[in-house]
Amino acid sequence: MNDPVRTTCPYCGVGCGVRAAVDANGAVSIAGDDGHPANAGRLCSKGATLGDTVGLDGRLLHPEVCGERADWDTALDTVADGFRDVINRHGPEAVAFYVSGQLLTEDYYVANKLMKGFIGGGNIDTNSRLCMSSAVAGHMRAFGEDVVPGCYADVDDADLIVLVGSNTAWCHPIVYRRIEAARAARPDLKLVVIDPRRTTTAEDADLHLPVAPGQDVALFNGLLAHLEAGGHIDSSFVDAHTEGAFAALAEARRGGAIAELARTTGIAEHDLARFFDWFASTERTVTMFSQGVNQSSAGTDKVNAIINCHLLTGRIGRPGTGPFSITGQPNAMGGREVGGLANTLAAHRDFDAVDSVGAFWRAPQIARAPGLKAVDMFEAIGEGRIKAVWIMATNPVVSLPNADGLRAALETCDLVVVSDCEGATDTLTCADIKLPATGWGEKDGTVTNSERCISRQRPFLPAPGEAKPDWWIIGEVARRLGHGDAFDYRSPHDIFVEHAALSAHDNDGRYAFDIGGLANLTRAEYDALEPLQWPVLEVIPSPPWAGERARERGWPDTLPSPPSPQSSPPVVGGRGSALSGTRRLFTDGVFPTETGRARFVAITPRGPAHAPDADHPLVLNTGRVRDHWHTMTRTGRSARLSAHVDEPFAAVHPQDAQVFGLGDGALARLETEWGHMLARVRVDEGQARGSVFVPMHWNAQTAAAGRVGALVNPVVDPVSGEPEFKHTPLRLREF
Ligand code: SF4
């Protein structure tokens, strides 16, 4: 058995540390990394079975062009020629990259730099659009920047934890274990779960509020008004550090008294009152939210309604307090750091930093305006406005709304390139060119989790077949497009230090995302990098940052000055460093807005875009099960994981099942205006009446008629562009 390699789980945004070892027969054993601050050695069922998922069966091992095996040069030349031809004839906005939270930060950085900096178009967006872009937009509205104020250690310090739209026990299990441990240690800690479904998490709560679908803003506006009415305002914080409270409160008061709020939200009046009183009287309150908040046509408003309550009570930037977005993917923050969302540029900056970033990259034709967000991007493909698309490490033919429409759009697109480690996904069936990428266990780079902690993913397996790292593939295409000098990377370390330097470039202390202190990491220090939360302002004293390589690249000299020895704690190789796992933002009450004040947002509640009607009287709500991940391309390889739930199902309230004549175990046909599927009925008393829950994971490779994405309405939040996965009118009948 080789010595274990310390790496990071590739699934959810908790970002657990993993120790992976390979024995003489090639079998992989997995254990939790007790030195990682996110999990301290714990792993959930998905992380613990990672060894089951690294086999080569079904992997994409060789490039293919138009269904024929090709060598790398031929495949890369064909990609570059195709993109060049479209750009020359139709301009840079006629091409697009659709990327993924499964990419490492270094892959993401190179893809974003190529599209925005050198192709000169804005059309790069990511599947992170589907899980947390409403949180991003809410953070930007409130704080002026996309930053998560808290950290997991706040769970240990809180006296009240509010989970909104999150089945944390199943979807972020190690965070939930931390909540359980905190409750065991301090029995007075209260847990409130706000969710239309009575999930496993809700079963455990001190108080479950089954909010009616889409009424979260009404609920938190009601809380805001209650806090004001009861005098629970931190006036000194509000006066000194915020703006806009007056308008937000005026809007919140319009929700009416608690009896009216109970009718609006569908929550019993006494439960609502209890929640309001607990929130009002508990100083150390953390509100954690996830896809149930974000995946809505009013997702950004819901995020700001939550943040408003924390601003009014001054509960932010202190231990055990704060609004906290717990995000879906392993590189939850990394893609946001590099600018992988179409509406951001790079290094957490908007397009107003275009000249500065353009100068740093030496990019003469940098994109000057945001590109199309995911749903709009695929609509543009269907309409022929985008004629070439490169999809990396994601499976949109399963995961996006109106997935059948999306597949039809790809089938009409002039050029579809897909790079993936898997060989048989629904999206690959639409590809003209298939490029084999390395997968987890082979990849080398960094990821950043929900609490802004950067961790290394390290390889412990050789790249199989002809698979190559994503950053290499993108760089080779960039070189063929004539941008070789700017993409002359020899390793992920080269990319990471450039990324770190950009985060500090022209920053002037305005941006919380500053990892400039890591810009002078040597390769050895990068390889040994311990989990580390940003901001990282400290500069490692030696060697001179990035040395010759930096001068070769002509990076500007606006990096942080070397600090005095006293203020320069070591940040590499120091397990248990004070920098790991405890870094909160806004501890001084200063926010990265123009005024330095956090912004309340006045919010008028809006319901979901499509209401049920006589034809479609139910509501489809999609989500995850405990042991599968995304479209199952990895977890589907593990028999142990598949044993938990082995086929698509539709959870239906007993009275709805009776109305539609469906017994437990019946095969049902689910129909919406956008598509249909088959699923096994599970009669479930935890379902709200009128609501049907269906997991998102199954695809045409695993259940021919089980793709729920085909049913979901392609409605998005107007601010964030995040789709409304939680609310599509539905009808149901026995198959
Ligand atoms: Fe941790 Fe999430 Fe991986 Fe589970 S799936 S081990 S909670 S990172």
Image: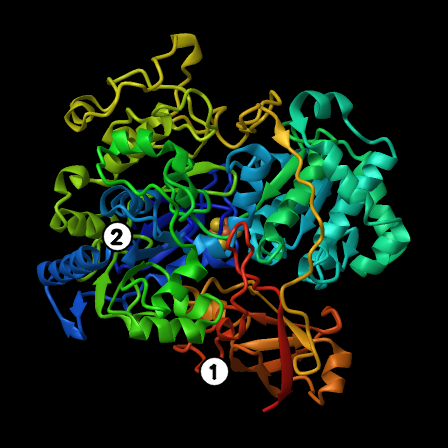
> From the viewer's perspective, is 238 left or right of 357?
right
Identify the image quadrant of residue 392.
bottom left
Can I make out residue 188 in this image?
no
Can I make out residue 114 in this image?
yes
Whether residue 699 is situated above or below residue 481 in the rendered picture: below
Ligand 1 near label 2 (Cβ, under 8 Å)? no
Give the number of the disc on residue 705: 1
Q: Element at badge 1?
A: loop
- Front residue of 368/426: it is 368
Residue 654, how many percent across, how many down? 75, 79
Gap between marks 2 and 1 measured at Cα: 37 Å
Label 2 sits on residue: 92
> From the viewer's perspective, is 308 left or right of 58?
right
Which amino acid, by three-letter code, is at mark 1? Ala
Residue 540, how many percent across, how many down? 33, 19
Question: How many marks are shown on the rendered structure?
Answer: 2
- Front residue of 304/382: it is 382
Whether residue 109 is situated above or below residue 468 in the rendered picture: above
- Pick the quarter of the image with the C terminus: bottom right
> From the viewer's perspective, is 466 left or right of 308?
left
- Front residue of 597/449: it is 597
Estimate how packed mark 1 is, as few (under 14), some (14 to 19) or many (20 or more) residues with alpha carbons within 10 Å: some
In primary-sequence order, the first of circles 2 and 1 is: 2
**Mark closer to the observer (2, 1):** 2
Give me the residue at 46% from left, 52% from top: 329
Residue 710, how many percent across, how many down? 49, 75
Identify the image quadrant of residue 666.
bottom right
Which amino acid, by three-letter code, is at mark 2? Pro
